[in-house]
Image (cartoon, helix red, strand yellow):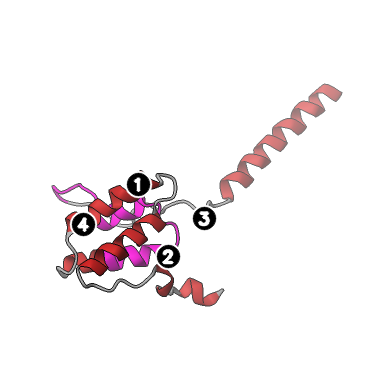
């Protein structure tokens, strides 16, 4: 009788722990793409590549990368330069490349006469609420 009670309590505890762990969300996870990639071009966009490879976890970092991609689309930044700085940052610190990317992009943009704002200047509604 006592052994059965211990077995039932262990099972109940395991199920409860599984339910609680499943309901918690990890905030540092990089979100997956919200729109499906349709058509014959199934490659990631430059923005998706930068967000995922540079581990952009905050809204400010994502907004900064969106701005960088926008500058590429406007022709103010060369895509080869952006990809080269991404690779440089990944070589410098594979586990935390974003600060290295920002500094390298700022230095390269200054050389071509383009002023890039720092990541901290990208305010988000989430930042304003806290």
Q: Residue furthest front?
A: 111
Secondary structure at badge 3 equals: loop
Secondary structure at badge 4 equals: helix
Q: Which of marks 4 and 2 is nearer the N terminus?
A: 2
What residue is disc 3 on? 27
Residue 126, given in percent of the width and then of the height, sits at: 49, 71
Is residue 51 a member of the stretch shown in magenta? yes
Q: Quadrant of the N terminus?
A: top right
Residue 121, given in percent of the width and then of the height, sits at: 41, 74
Q: Is residue 15 visible to the viewer in this orientation of the structure?
A: yes
Mark 2 or mark 1: which is in front?
Answer: 1
Residue at (52% x, 55% y) in the render:
27
Q: Which of marks 3 and 1 is nearer the N terminus?
A: 3
Q: Earlier in the sequence, mark 2 or mark 3?
A: 3
What residue is disc 4 on? 81
Q: For this view, does 83 lie left or right of residue 60?
A: left
Which quadrant of the structure image shows residue 62? bottom left
What residue is disc 2 on? 59
Is residue 43 a member of the stretch shown in magenta? yes
For the residues marked 4 and 3, what is the alpha-carbon distance in whole angstroms?
31 Å
Q: Which residue lies furthest to the right in this view?
A: 2
Q: Is residue 36 visible to the viewer in this orientation of the structure?
A: no
What residue is disc 1 on? 90
Q: For this view, does 38 lie left or right of residue 100?
A: left
For the residues marked 3 and 1, what is the alpha-carbon distance in whole angstroms?
22 Å
Residue at (35% x, 46% y) in the render:
90
Q: What stretch is highlighted in magenta?
A: 39-68
Q: In which quarter of the image is the C terminus?
A: bottom right
Q: Earlier in the sequence, mark 2 or mark 1?
A: 2
Secondary structure at badge 1 equals: helix
Mark 3 or mark 1: which is in front?
Answer: 1
Q: Earlier in the sequence, mark 1 or mark 4?
A: 4
């Amino acid at each position: 009788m006592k052994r059965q009670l211990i077995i039932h309590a262990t099972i109940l505890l395991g199920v409860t722990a599984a339910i609680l762990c499943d309901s918690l969300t990890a905030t540092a996870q990089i979100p997956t793409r919200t729109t499906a990639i349709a058509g014959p071009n199934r490659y990631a966009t430059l923005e998706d590549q930068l967000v995922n490879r540079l581990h952009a976890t905050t809204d400010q970092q994502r907004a900064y990368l969106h701005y960088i991609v926008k500058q590429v689309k406007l022709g103010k930044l060369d895509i080869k330069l952006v990809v080269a700085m991404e690779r440089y940052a990944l070589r410098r610190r594979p586990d935390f490349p974003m600060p290295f990317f920002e500094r390298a992009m700022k230095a390269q943009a200054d050389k071509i006469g383009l002023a890039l704002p720092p990541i901290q200047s990208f305010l988000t509604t989430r930042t304003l609420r806290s």
